[in-house]
Image (tube, grey):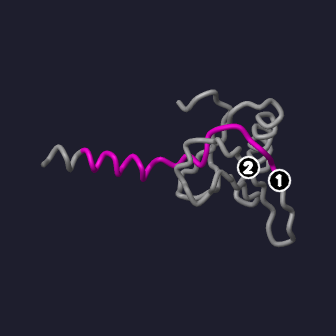
Amino acid sequence: MFKILSILFILFSFNVFSNNIAFGTLKGIKVYDYSSEKITKIYFSSDATNKDVPSCGGVVTLTHSLRSEQSLNTMIGIAMTAYVSGKKVRAFSSGDTCEADFLALQDSIF
């Protein structure tokens, strides 16, 4: 019984802390400049994997007001490079949201 509970705890913990928004190639990047909000959305291809935050549907949000200009430019630069080259991107959120805290060009998850 203890082994079963331990395994369930480990599996449950893994799901709680897995916050990959998506991993794969990109199908688009859109910059929204509304008067009330400025955001960039990064859209993953339908074959993207590791969608641990189901509510995101493979779409990453970068809210401009939440990060420095340098951080925002770096993240958009990574996304644009991946889009143009067809390379894979990993997007990760430290919370259970679609707001990316980590964006990387990667061939695999590591």
Residue at figure coordinates x 80%, y 34% from the top left = 81
Q: How many marks?
A: 2
Task: Pinpoint residue 59: horizontal percent, then vertical percent.
Answer: 68, 53
Q: Which of 24 and 13 is in front in this view?
A: 24
| Res 26 → quadrant | top right
Residue position for label 1: 30
Residue at 54% from the left image edge and 54% from the top image edge: 53
**Is residue 31 inside the magenta stretch?**
no
Which label number is shown at residue 43?
2
Q: Please, what is the three-letter code of the amino acid marked with disc 2?
A: Tyr
In the displayed structure, 2 sits above or below 34; it is above
Residue 7 picture location, percent across and down: 25, 44
Asked whether 28 falls inside the magenta stretch, the response is yes
Q: Position of residue 30 (x, y in %)?
A: 82, 53
Task: Report crowding for label 2: few under 14, some 14 to 19, many 20 or more residues within 10 A (C-alpha).
Answer: many
| Residue 48 position in % (x across, y down) | 63, 42
Which stretch did the figure color magenta? 7-29
Q: Nearer the viewer, residue 44 or 71?
A: 44
Q: Distance between the residues labelled 2 and 1?
A: 8 Å
Instruction: Find numbered disc 1 in the image and state the secondary structure of the residue it sits on.
Output: strand
Q: Identify the residue at horizontal 72%, vertical 54% (top origin).
A: 62
Q: Residue furthest left?
A: 1
In which quadrant of the rendered view does residue 87 lie? top right
SS at badge 2: strand
